[in-house]
Image: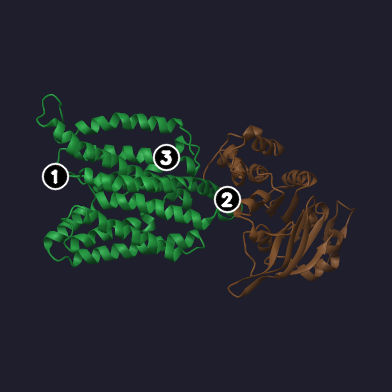
Chain colours: A brown, B green
């Protein structure tokens, strides 16, 4: 399964947010989108989720243009987790996770139970979301996406508000999701997380694609210096690397 | 579809109790055995009035629940979309031009006003489905309709018309007949059906606009159902009873703690609770020992305004 962005350009009020970005994402892998603030990471993710129609270029899912799919058909295949983590009403955890079944038009309990179990939320199933900690809330929101059994899981900075323990726990779940054959695409600010946990990295700067490929290449010291204007080097072994500024 | 949950059953039972009592309640309590012309009073005065209270209350309650779900704001009220003020403006125009004496023209003018409000809202909000633009468009329409209503009152052709307009705007079910039922009931039912179509979209909006769209929610279609639903329920209510405020604001709050708080599960109980509230409020204004009957709109505002204040204070405590 492939999710392709081909020469995608997006502009708002005359400002280019994405400029002819081409990226090919494969399922069964964790793909990370990195870049400094305002680089266009969230815009690219929204394009990949079919929520923003590019001004130019196209996004296709298994060679079918995303725009040709009905919103419901697209939603069945692409699950999207926004950054803000908004929950407007104080519903119970189970009710919130069950919203993930909406594209399928069923209230099937089995996928909801599975998603709750995958994120260790069974004991919290009947708890109102207002009584959850930040880490629990992040797990519930991810469970909502997983309950839809999407082929692609697109998440905008899902790890940003979490402490190290919760970050690693969530990354473990994302890895097991990718291992089941689903595609995972994450917007990630933490370059070390991307280096150690992603299989493929896309680096954006000012709306343009700067680098893409395995993390060792896409996040090389020279790319870090060019894009983030920070002189730094990677230390440590593969899978446990840290970025040290010079 | 919402299942027949406990709040729904309780509300149906309460309505089943309140409705017969409402037929007996009034300035004169009906004693079927001794009150002269009891059957005529019941059939031609009390029954249509009580049924109309149920119809209007149901429409306002359901519209309020949908509005709060759509705007994800517990302070939202159906009046925010400007449809009620536009319906009132239409009714005021019928007074102004001297058509109000006709049985059908007053509600017809009000319905035309509501339809104009709906069309204007759809036109301004466009196909984008943006909530902020939609709300601002509604506020603008409400403000414009309110200003034009004030202008119509200030330029009323005579003192009688002015008095008629002001009194009518206060909202009441006094002297309503089966005719008003035939106007309001089918339109409210159609509006309610439209609001029921919004349930899934409103549930998706719990997660915010972007996540809702990612779940397949179509903002433009959701807005269209909302405009139609609120236009028909609120518009028909204003057309037959004038402005009856606060029901759409209060009722979803009263009902929400007894549901699982998903907007889709709130529409039916809110309709039932709205029906019950307006029925009880109308009975209350009938039996109050006042020289003239207190207008229903005023009575509900007297209840609603302190409730609104309490709500704000509670929210402030929550934020503190």
Give yes or no for contact between labels 2 and 1 (Cβ–Cβ under 8 Å).
Answer: no
Q: For numbered disc 2, what is the local secondary structure?
A: loop
Residue to which mark 2 is pinned: A86
- Quarter residue B154 falls in: bottom left
Q: Are marks 3 and 1 on the same chain?
A: yes
Chain to which the residue tagged by mark 1 belongs: B
Q: Position of residue B236 (x, y in %)?
A: 31, 51
Chain to which the residue tagged by mark 3 belongs: B
Q: For numbered disc 1, what is the local secondary structure?
A: loop
- Give the CA distance from mark 3 to mark 2: 25 Å
In-image side of B96 versus B194 (left or right): left
Tag on residue A236?
none
Residue to which mark 3 is pinned: B268
Q: Residue lying furthest right in this view? A: A237
Name the residue at 66% across, 34% down. A110
Residue to which mark 1 is pinned: B292
Q: Residues within 10 Å of mark 1 (few under 14, many from 20)?
A: few
Q: For numbered disc 3, what is the local secondary structure?
A: helix
- Give the CA distance from mark 3 to mark 1: 35 Å
In-image side of A164 versus B129 (left or right): right
């Amino acid at each position: 399964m492939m999710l392709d962005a081909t020469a995608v350009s997006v502009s708002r009020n005359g400002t280019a947010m994405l400029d002819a970005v081409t990226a090919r994402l494969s399922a069964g892998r964790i793909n990370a989108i990195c870049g400094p603030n305002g680089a266009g990471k969230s815009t690219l993710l929204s394009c990949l989720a079919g929520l923003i129609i590019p001004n130019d270029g196209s996004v296709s899912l298994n060679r079918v243009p995303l725009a040709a799919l009905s919103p419901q058909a697209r939603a069945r295949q692409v699950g999207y987790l926004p950054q803000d983590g908004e929950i407007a009403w104080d519903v119970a955890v189970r009710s919130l996770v069950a919203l993930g079944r909406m594209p399928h038009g069923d209230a099937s309990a089995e996928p909801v139970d599975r998603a709750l179990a995958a994120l260790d939320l069974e004991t919290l199933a009947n708890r109102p979301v207002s009584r959850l900690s930040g880490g629990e809330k992040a797990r519930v929101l991810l469970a909502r996406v997983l309950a839809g059994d999407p082929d692609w899981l697109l998440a905008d900075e899902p790890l940003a508000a979490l402490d190290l323990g919760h970050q690693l726990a969530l990354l473990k779940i994302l890895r097991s999701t990718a291992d089941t054959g689903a595609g995972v695409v994450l917007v990630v600010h933490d370059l070390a997380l991307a280096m150690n946990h992603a299989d493929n990295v896309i680096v954006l700067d000012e709306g343009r694609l700067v680098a893409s490929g395995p993390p060792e290449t896409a996040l090389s010291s020279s790319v870090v210096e060019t894009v983030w204007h920070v002189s730094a080097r990677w230390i440590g072994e593969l899978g446990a690397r840290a970025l040290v500024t010079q | 579809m919402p299942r027949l949950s406990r709040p729904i059953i309780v509300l149906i039972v309460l309505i089943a109790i309140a409705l017969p009592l409402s037929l007996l309640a009034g300035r004169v309590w009906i004693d079927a055995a001794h009150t002269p012309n009891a059957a005529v009073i019941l059939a031609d005065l009390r029954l249509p009035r009580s049924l109309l209270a149920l119809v209007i209350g149901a429409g306002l309650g359901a519209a309020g629940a949908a509005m709060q779900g759509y705007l994800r704001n517990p302070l939202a009220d159906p009046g925010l979309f400007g449809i009620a003020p536009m319906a009132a403006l239409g009714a005021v125009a019928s007074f102004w031009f001297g058509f109000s004496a006709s049985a059908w023209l007053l509600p017809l003018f009000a319905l035309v006003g509501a339809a104009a409000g709906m069309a204007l809202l759809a036109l301004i909000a466009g196909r984008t489905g943006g909530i902020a633009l939609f709300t601002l468009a509604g506020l603008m329409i409400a403000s414009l309709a309110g200003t034009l209503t004030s202008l119509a009152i200030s330029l009323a052709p005579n003192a009688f018309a002015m008095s008629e307009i002001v009194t009518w705007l206060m909202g009441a079910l006094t002297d309503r007949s089966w005719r008003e039922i035939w106007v309001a009931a089918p339109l409210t039912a159609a509006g309610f059906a439209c609001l029921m179509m919004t349930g899934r979209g409103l549930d998706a909006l719990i997660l915010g606009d972007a996540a809702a769209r990612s779940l397949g929610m179509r903002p433009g279609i959701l807005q269209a159902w909302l405009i139609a639903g609120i236009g028909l329920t609120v518009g028909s209510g204003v057309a037959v009873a004038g402005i009856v405020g606060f029901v759409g604001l209060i009722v979803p709050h009263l009902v929400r703690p007894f549901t699982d708080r998903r907007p889709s599960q709130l529409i039916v109980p809110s309709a039932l609770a709205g029906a019950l509230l307006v029925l009880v409020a109308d009975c209350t204004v009938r039996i109050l020992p006042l020289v003239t009957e207190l207008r229903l709109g005023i009575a509900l505002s007297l209840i609603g305004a302190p409730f609104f204040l309490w709500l704000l204070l509670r929210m402030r405590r929550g934020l503190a």
